[in-house]
Image: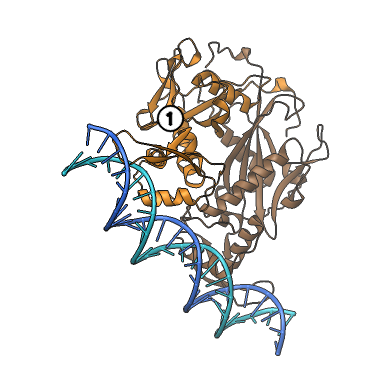
Chain colours: A orange, B brown, C blue, D cyan
Amino acid sequence: MSASYDPRAFPPFAVTVDIVVLSVVDDLAVLTVRRGEQPFAGRQALPGGFVRPQESVADAAWRELAEETGLGPDVLPGVHLEQLATFGEVDRDPRMRVVSVAHLAMVPQRPLPTAGTDAADARWTPVADATGLAFDHDDILQVALERVRAKLEYTTLATSLIGPDFTLGELQAVYEAVWGCRLQRANFRRKVLATPGFVQATDRSRTGRQGGAPATVYVAGDGAALTPPMMRP
Amino acid sequence: MSASYDPRAFPPFAVTVDIVVLSVVDDLAVLTVRRGEQPFAGRQALPGGFVRPQESVADAAWRELAEETGLGPDVLPGVHLEQLATFGEVDRDPRMRVVSVAHLAMVPQRPLPTAGTDAADARWTPVADATGLAFDHDDILQVALERVRAKLEYTTLATSLIGPDFTLGELQAVYEAVWGCRLQRANFRRKVLATPGFVQATDRSRTGRQGGAPATVYVAGDGAALTPPMMRP
DNA sequence: TGAATAGTGTCTTTGAGACAATATGCC
DNA sequence: GGCATATTGTCTCAAAGACACTATTCA
């Protein structure tokens, strides 16, 4: 630490949180909001906001997630939210010095934008189309995508992108949407079912959109790790 | 983003970088500095300091690393430095609101503390003894240790903890020091040598401290990934 | 000579990749 | 019936785990 510690000696940094909220229905999609003011007015941006003086960075991320997604307190506790990385380039915001702590959230469904709330101008953008975002949010999104792709390899977090219940075919579709490649059914099933705590079978079955045999319905298990990992092809 | 963006509307956050500098000679050790002032005067702490207004967070980490380790510009470019996580609890510093971006550095040797510089009161502490650090630095260290243990599984970064050249026995000792367990020699050799770009053999050999056959000397290769990973037992 | 280390070989087991075969549903 | 999906089985191959054996150096 420096010898001087007078708060006034240090010009103010603003600290913000930005959140990459991901979900899968058909494609992998990210929640974006339309900016109404300069700079980058009219452009899409990641949801985020300032950390308040009496609020931890983690609390700020949860608050912004609740405000921007419109998710209620019933489903929020089951949402996965983790810190991603901090972006601290000097000129990343043209107005002042802003350091942003980026977060990654994985939600099990796509909540509908709710009129009259902050989420009113939020929308889901397929990640393939999410370019030209405001500030350095393109960079943040790329870091988030690499993180989630890697995490599906060694954790059971794919279950947090769908749900609350799902078939193994739907779970495989999540992997294929995130990784952008096809997987072999039989090997995927073998790996998932052999991993303790990944999924838990129910006594229900379900038939998909285009027919086919009814598939067993599963819910997420209580396991978190996937050892050995399931590697991307 | 909030509707108001007046810098004066936001109480000042201080932004710091703290660095977990790790190295291995016999044990895994972390560089700590003794605090001379309140709070936590006399306690050991991680090296760190304020991010300057015209300096990116990454630049601040490199500057602090250079100042605190005394490493010269000849070896610094070869040092591994990466962002670890950001610690933003409200009361982590009793004096004012400080958000710290923690970093992880892996240096190939233990540079000697240099009198007359910031590094004068720096010292290497075996990680097993590094408890009771100032602020939330115990937590930061634990996150760093888990990160480096995981990274040895799927990257070739172990070579950045020794060097510039080494035998396979010494490389194995790095893994054993970081993971805290013994590995089987034959299997370790097979994995390292089968991984493209992990190590590169030289035409030299070297004999260890307690005799034994002379071992081939290697240098780090140009590969970064280790696929499939080498799993901890 | 004995202890310690380096290097090589091999047997076994685990798990992933690829693919086939059968069953069950919707249209 | 035709198509799509689910479920199970099997063969093969790559890689890790465990362990044995030999060679070389220092004390």
Q: Residue at x 46, y 40 (%)?
A: A203
Q: Residue at x 65, y 41 (%)?
A: B19
Relative to the observer, which residue lies in front, D26 or A50?
A: A50
Q: Residue at x 45, y 32 (%)?
A: A141
Quarter of the image with the N terminus of chain A is top right
x, y percent for residue B58:
57, 36
x, y percent for residue A186:
37, 51
Identify the residue position indicated by label 1 in the image. A138
Among the 4 quarters of the image, the one containing residue A88:
top right
Relative to the observer, which residue lies in front, A32 or B28?
A: A32
A13 vs A116: above or below: below
Under mark 1, the amino acid is Asp
Q: Is residue A189 in view?
A: yes
B202 vs B138: above or below: below
Q: Is residue B92 left or right of residue B82?
A: right
Q: Is residue A88 in view?
A: no
- Tally the numbered discs: 1
x, y percent for residue B211:
67, 76
Q: Chain of mark 1?
A: A
Q: Is residue B213 left or right of residue A128?
A: right
Q: Is residue B1 left or right of residue A208?
A: right
Label 1 sits on a secondary structure element that is helix
